[in-house]
Image (spheres, grey):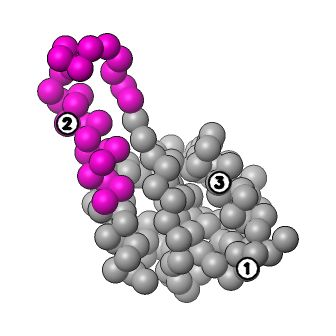
Amino acid sequence: MEALKDRVAIVTGASRGIGLGVAAELVRQGAKVCVTARGREALDAAVAELGGPCVAIAVAGKADDAGHQEEAVASTIEAFGRLDMLVNNTGINPVYGPLADIDAAAAAKILAVNVLAPLAWTRRARDAW
């Protein structure tokens, strides 16, 4: 099946789990992907699993880092000539318990990664289109 032939996607949080599964399905359907996550080694393994640099590239960094977002979009366009899709898969939940007891810094980080970063990724992808 090649329903997405010649399409290009960025998938955040894609070194393992749901993100890697989404990236694998996109490649199976003919797309090329840029996978992002924090760990370089895990991303390199993901690229190999996806079929190598002809169909996948990796850009390591933190999802809420503007420089990382810019680098991922630029690298994707440089490698594949376009950007058609964005899968905002990254999310964190580093604390558990009553909301009233959450540390303010932890709450700010959760909002930065889970709410503000996807908005920034979407804007960068839109601007690249």
Q: Residue at x 22, y 31 (%)?
A: 107
Which of the numbered marks, if any, corresponds to residue 22?
3
Which of the numbered marks, if any, corresponds to residue 5?
1
Q: Which residue is mark 2?
A: 108
Q: CA distance from mark 2 to mark 1?
A: 39 Å
Residue 118 in the magenta stretch? The answer is yes
- Verify CB contact (< 8 Å) between mark 3 and mark 2: no
Q: Residue at x 53, y 71 (%)?
A: 85
Which of the numbered marks, if any, corresponds to residue 124?
none
Give the x, y percent position of residue 68: 36, 60
- Residue type at the position of mark 2: Ala
Most extreme residue toward the right is: 1
Q: Nearer the viewer, residue 97 or 56?
A: 97
Q: Residue at x 34, y 44 (%)?
A: 114
The total number of labels drawn is: 3
Q: Is residue 48 above or below residue 27?
A: above
Q: Quadrant of residue 47?
A: bottom right
Q: Secondary structure at mark 1?
A: loop
Q: Secondary structure at mark 3?
A: helix
Q: Which segment is the magenta one?
A: 93-119
